[in-house]
Image: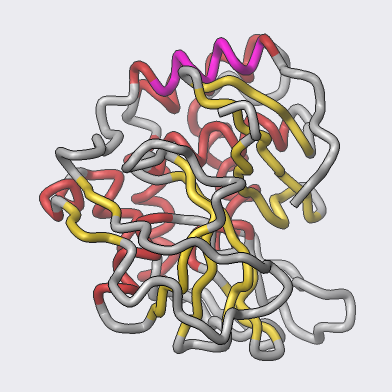
């Protein structure tokens, strides 16, 4: 997992820490969730034959948080997609309304209001909220072809990052803790263990790098995600990086050194995920 890290982005470190601080929707370790990391995985090349974690990753989650508007509308989106890439995605009227309700909900939060203001000041987003919502929709929910050879519009930024996809018995994307918890609770996830490099060193880290299999189609030898973040926080930081055309951005978010990887797909997002730096 060795890689060359970019220079620290001071501006985004300060702004993302501000977003983290004002986000009253984030979940708190020891209060809203408890992790059970168990054993660590030694290789990211393939799924380990040995299961280094016999129990679930999440020992506890306070499900009352899912009654909050942004969490509730986020959950409504998780069953709207065809998991296998290459399979055509369709958008029903109900699903369109769910997408819009989610954007409306996150735009009511201080995190997204401050992010909108930040982007307007940089001339990267329209000032009118209606037009900014349309931009968010285009970035996250517009369908595209995951691979050039795909015949169908089979993917979107939201599906890849937050829901997860499968391709040839491999899991791709799937970088969200809420989806992981819900799938694990249903028995669809087999958590194999964590990687010491890429995972915070505290008992309940805010960022983890793990290995798992998914009953919907194979395994993910290595994948990383935030833990406890609100939907709007992740949408905000990834949107800002995308609109600033920053593919690899090192930031210090409230004392946590992270490299944000945000890759475009046309004008939208192809993939977005965090990697914990060794300096944590």
Which residue sits at x=68%, y=10%?
A: 10
210 vs 16, nearest the viewer = 210
Magenta extent: 11-20
243 vs 34, nearest the viewer = 34
In this picture, is 245 found above or below 208?
above
51 vs 69, nearest the viewer = 51
Task: Residue at the far right: name it.
Answer: 149
In this picture, is 18 found above or below 220?
above
Which residue sits at x=72%, y=57%?
A: 270
Which residue sits at x=45%, y=38%?
A: 201
Provide residue 5's location: percent of width, then percent of height. Answer: 80, 32
Q: How is the image coloured?
A: secondary structure
Provide residue 104's location: percent of width, then percent of height. Answer: 37, 41
In this picture, is 264 found above or below 279?
below
- The dominant secondary structure in magenta is helix
Name the image quarter holding the C terminus. Answer: top right
Residue 13 on the magenta span: yes
Provide residue 227's location: percent of width, then percent of height. Answer: 39, 45
| Left or right of 183, for residue 171 | right
Residue 118 on the magenta span: no
Occupied quadrant, residue 257: top right
Which residue sits at x=40%, y=79%?
A: 190
Occupied quadrant, residue 29: top left
Q: How many marks?
A: 0
Provide residue 212's location: percent of width, then percent of height. Answer: 50, 74
In this picture, is 14 found above or below 4?
above
| Left or right of 257, for residue 1 | right
Occupied quadrant, residue 14: top right
């Amino acid at each position: 997992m060795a890689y060359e890290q970019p220079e620290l982005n001071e501006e985004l470190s300060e702004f993302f820490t501000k977003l983290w601080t004002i986000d009253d929707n984030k979940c708190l370790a020891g209060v809203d969730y408890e992790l059970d990391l168990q054993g660590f995985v030694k290789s990211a090349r393939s799924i380990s034959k040995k299961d280094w974690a016999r129990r679930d990753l999440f020992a506890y989650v306070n499900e009352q948080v899912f009654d909050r508007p942004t969490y509730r509308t986020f959950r409504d989106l998780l069953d709207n997609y065809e998991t296998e890439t290459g399979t055509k995605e369709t958008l029903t009227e109900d699903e369109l309304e769910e997408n819009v309700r989610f954007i409306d909900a996150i735009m009511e939060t201080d995190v997204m209001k401050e992010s909108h203001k930040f982007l307007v000041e940089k001339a990267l987003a329209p000032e009118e909220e209606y037009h900014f919502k349309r931009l968010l929709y285009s970035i996250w929910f517009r369908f595209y072809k995951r691979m050039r050879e795909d015949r169908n519009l089979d993917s979107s930024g939201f599906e890849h990052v937050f829901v997860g996809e499968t391709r040839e018995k491999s899991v791709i994307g799937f970088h969200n803790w809420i989806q992981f918890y819900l799938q694990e609770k249903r028995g669809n996830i087999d958590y194999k263990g964590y990687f010491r490099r890429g995972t915070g060193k505290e008992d309940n880290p805010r960022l983890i790098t793990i290995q798992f299999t998914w009953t919907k189609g194979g395994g993910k030898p290595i994948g990383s995600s935030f833990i406890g973040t609100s939907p709007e926080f992740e949408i905000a930081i990834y949107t800002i990086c995308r609109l600033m055309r920053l593919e690899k951005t090192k930031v210090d978010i409230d004392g946590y050194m992270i490299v944000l990887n945000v890759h475009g797909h046309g004008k939208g997002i192809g993939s977005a995920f965090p990697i914990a730096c060794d300096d944590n």
